[in-house]
Amino acid sequence: MSLLDNSAFLLAFLIACSAKTTILLALAWVTVGAARHRSSALRHFAWAVGILGSLTLPLLSLLLPAWHSAALGNAVGVWGPAHAIASGPSSLTLPSMIVDAGAVSPLFGKLAGLALLVWAAGFLFFAMRLIVGLARLVWISARAKPLFDDGWKRTALELSKSFKIERPVRLLECGHPAAMPLTWGILRPLVIFPSASADWPEDRRRIVLSHELAHIARGDWFLQACAELARAFYWFHPLVWTAAERLRQESELACDDCVLNSGIQPSEYANQLLDLARSLQHSGRAWSLALAIARRSNLERRFAVMLNPSVNRHGLSLKSRLLTALSAFCLLLPLAVLRLPAQDVARKFSGTIRDVSGAAVPNATIIMTNNKANVVEMTASDAAGNFGFKTLPAGEYEMKALKRGFVEYKAPQVVLEPGREASQNVTLKIAAVMEEVDVLAEGTAKPLPSSGTSGKPARLRVGGDVEAAKRLNLVTPVYPQAAKAAGIQGTVILHAIIGMDGTPLSLRVMNGDIDPELTRSAVEAVSKWRYRPTLLNGEPIEVDTTIMVNFKLLS
């Protein structure tokens, strides 16, 4: 299965995920705007829920059953002028015939494949940058040595209890004297200090440790890693970039609130941060996953917030977390199962058309009818008998296969599911031969009761890979004198099999209510007919035939 074969489906899936992510993050933005007077912890949690939702959307869309919106489908029908159907008091409602030129065009497939390659290139670039940053953190941590100072340990243990951190936190000291303190890790989090931290006073130690341990207690590094992963997957989406940056900013503000809530004065905290920003080097792009205490990019805003006494610095209660998460789940679930019109396509529906001998039937017409959507789509088999629809809308179809000289094939229920391939192989049977002979005589017709027959059977033209049987001689039936004298007329319907030698076999009368004299005359005459046999791909075969002998009296 090549990329070009599935490019339209994959591109529609990516676009749908991007559209749903836009809804999620837009609502997160609205929530954050409404909570601008609430705590930073609440705003951070709103952004975190939006980002986690954007990452789980693709997985849930693949795992959960689909929900097809009739409203969206009707909206597409209203705004799609190419699919409009004229209506009026005297007009007939006919299925629309859609020829999806873009779906079968090689140029369309190449453009969709090119778009996916561009997305993949961007994803690999940002994913590699993320992996390099993580590898750099691992390398720095491996070269750092444990911090054994008793004062650091006592302060860390005391603060860990106050933040209710049960996981072991490792304190490391790197060899660089001016490195920015940072935190990373999930199950075994690390806090890395510069070598110059051994000479820090007690108040700076407590401030820095309070900030970094607040990150660990809140799980900020995991959430920031998810934000960077979302930014790699949706690298083309500006709202995802904004959400990731705002998540980092709100996490720093929330940790600042934790430090201030522990009893540190805002002015003292601001002075310590300013000193750290002046004397230490920031982490840079290679450490993009690290959470540093004094990133210069947002220090001004942090100072303004921490020095404002009216700012709400309360943490996020369990009730608020559950309510926000439940609200997000109630939105995420329907978004995940919703299939947009562009997604509601099957990847491919294909098959092979063959005759009863197993040979391929070229140029057969395959018709797929979706009665619910009032849409008909068509294609034809190639020289090898193969056919295929690349982008059929998902749904329940009636399939027909037509070829001159063959009996119409009909499959009343073919179900195509979104994003899945399906196939149907068809064997066409040879169509029956139709013959009709009129036997005329002078006389007056006697009125007869209705025989229950309804009209003449439809005649089928035989062609293509089938050479039809041809009658070589005709023995005309004789109108029986007794029937003519009694004014009896009617149609004798005979069924026979034209053998491989052209002889009518197994003659059988199909309508038993006809006059016996007429029947006998018809059977005697037809049994003497001879045919050139029917040829299928050059080989003689037996074929059904229906012969109608009409006995009519001319008044």
Image (spheres, grey):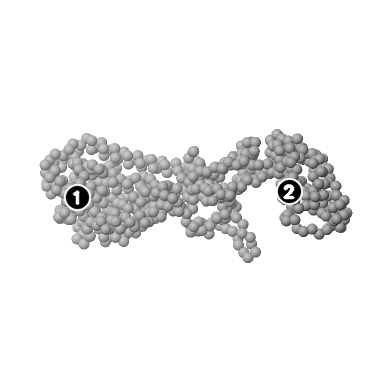
Reading the image, the residue beneath label 2 is 510
Mark toward the viewer: 1 or 2? 2
Measured as percent of width and height from the top left, residue 356 is found at 64, 38
Q: Label 2, secondary structure: give it.
A: loop
Q: Quadrant of residue 46?
A: bottom left
* Residue at the bottom extreme of this rendering: 89
- Up-down: is 411 above or below 26? above
Pick the front one: 58 or 472: 472
Measured as percent of width and height from the top left, residue 230 is found at 35, 47
Q: Can residue 99 be seen in the rendering of this structure?
A: no
305 sits left or right of 402 in the view: left
| Label total for image | 2
Q: Are marks 1 and 2 in contact (CB under 8 Å)?
A: no
Q: Can residue 54 be seen in the rendering of this structure?
A: yes
Q: Label 1, secondary structure: give it.
A: loop
Measured as percent of width and height from the top left, residue 172 is found at 19, 40
Pick the front one: 442 or 263: 442
418 sits left or right of 459 in the view: left
- Could you say which disc has been placed on residue 164 in the image? 1
Measured as percent of width and height from the top left, residue 381 is found at 61, 41
Mark 1 packing: few (<14 Cα in 10 Å), some, or many (20+)?
few
